[in-house]
Image: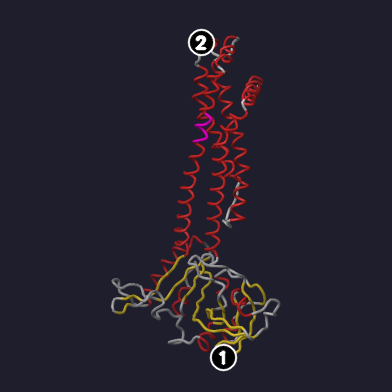
Amino acid sequence: MAFLIMTMMAALRALDRHRLRSTLAMLGIVIGVASLIVMMSIGEGTQAAVQNQLATFGRNMIMILRGAYTSSGVRSGHGGVVSLTIADIQVLEGLPEVSKVGWQKWGARQVVHEKHNWYTNITGVTPSYLAIRDWRISSGHGLNQADEDSMAKVVLLGRTVVEALFDEGDELVGATVRLSNMPFTVIGTLAPKGFDAYGADQDDIILMPFSTAERKVIGTQFIGSISIGYLSTASPDHVDRVATEAQRILRERHKLRPDQEDDFAVNNNREVAKIQLATSESMRHLLLAVTSISLLVGGIGIMNVLLVSVTQRTREIGIRMAVGAKRRHIRLQFLLEAIVLSGVGGLLGIAVGIGGASIASKIAHWPTIISLPSILLAFGFSSLVGLIFGLYPADFASRLHPAEALRGD
């Protein structure tokens, strides 16, 4: 241990004698570690943002949409044909993994409050809708079964609608808005969800009881038809199986032949999540590969500096060998110099990287997460680079012949 400490002190003194050269050698490591931390923090922040955005749809949720129709070779897209009913969704409630079911009918209408008006999405939903979508109430209270049974003229307002219709400081709960020339009482406001994965504003919405929307506001082609059905599973592990089983049951209910396409669509947000997370992960790996080049360049810089140091210190090496130093002692000293250079550069790079990630978050508004594993990985990588690129100069110094080294200048 004493020998190791003495060798470390000798390595530090050697580096201190050439501060500028040592600083320039560390610069590549500093830049590489800082870039690595910034890129990893942006990558982790992006993944977390994608997961949070997908969570706004509702956890463990499956959507069942109406089907499409084809006219003169042109497909209408999902929702073009009325092919889903309340009875379809209620049957799926019998699946053992399904914890909640719900359905909705939507349209667009002009809503008026005093001197303000706004054209927005009107959605009739069941009382279970908010729980399935994991949507919190910001003020007031949600819809209940009594509202549904009585076709109550009550609404919940999204944040965008609130900002369009009300002035700051206005009382929201209990206010009256007009839809289709009918007064509706605001019983609550929804917590903001922001934009979804497709870029739509989820807060530009008014919720009301499904029965009210069907009978009084939006209308229907026939009673009991729905726009979208919702299923919620008890565990995310059940989502794929429930989606497959729901598709099978609905095909049987709709009496579709094996050669016929589904007249509905079962959407699983987990598939969207997999695609987006895979894209984010691929981008993060690409960025890490690019930033790793900086560390390799820094390692080459350390190797060059140590090779120059060996040629300048051949006489010192010869004297140490002449007084009894073994090759392993010389090799260890130069290895420690390389590790110290990369280690100190790594520590400085960590500080620069944390600062860079914070600046990127505040100025560019990029989502960033600075995690301990990313810091440890960056520091470990920098130390490994120093060790690898220090092997050749250290071995070169240890193989010098004592007599030839003593003749060196």
When asked about the image quadrant of residue 32, the answer is top right
Q: Position of residue 290 (x, y in %)?
A: 47, 44
List the single residue furthest toward the bottom: 181
Q: Check if residue 298 falls in the magenta segment.
A: yes
Q: Position of residue 164 (x, y in %)?
A: 60, 78
**Callout 1 secondary element:** loop
Numbered label tally: 2
Residue 150 vs 395, above or below: the answer is below
Front residue of 367/316: it is 316
Q: Position of residue 300 (x, y in %)?
A: 49, 32
Quadrant of the image for the N terminus? top right
Q: Nearer the viewer, mark 1 or mark 2?
A: 2
Q: Position of residue 195 (x, y in %)?
A: 54, 67
Residue 226 vs 198, above or below: the answer is below
> Does residue 32 appear left or right of residue 76 in this picture?
right
At horizontal 56% and vertical 61% (from top left) the residue drawn is 52
Magenta range: 297-302
Q: Amino acid at mark 1?
A: Asn
Front residue of 275/365: it is 365
Report which residue position mark 1 lands on: 181
Q: Amino acid at mark 2?
A: Glu
Residue 240 vs 101, above or below: the answer is above
Q: CA distance from mark 1 to mark 2?
A: 102 Å
Q: Which mark is residue 404?
A: 2
Q: Earlier in the sequence, mark 1 or mark 2?
A: 1
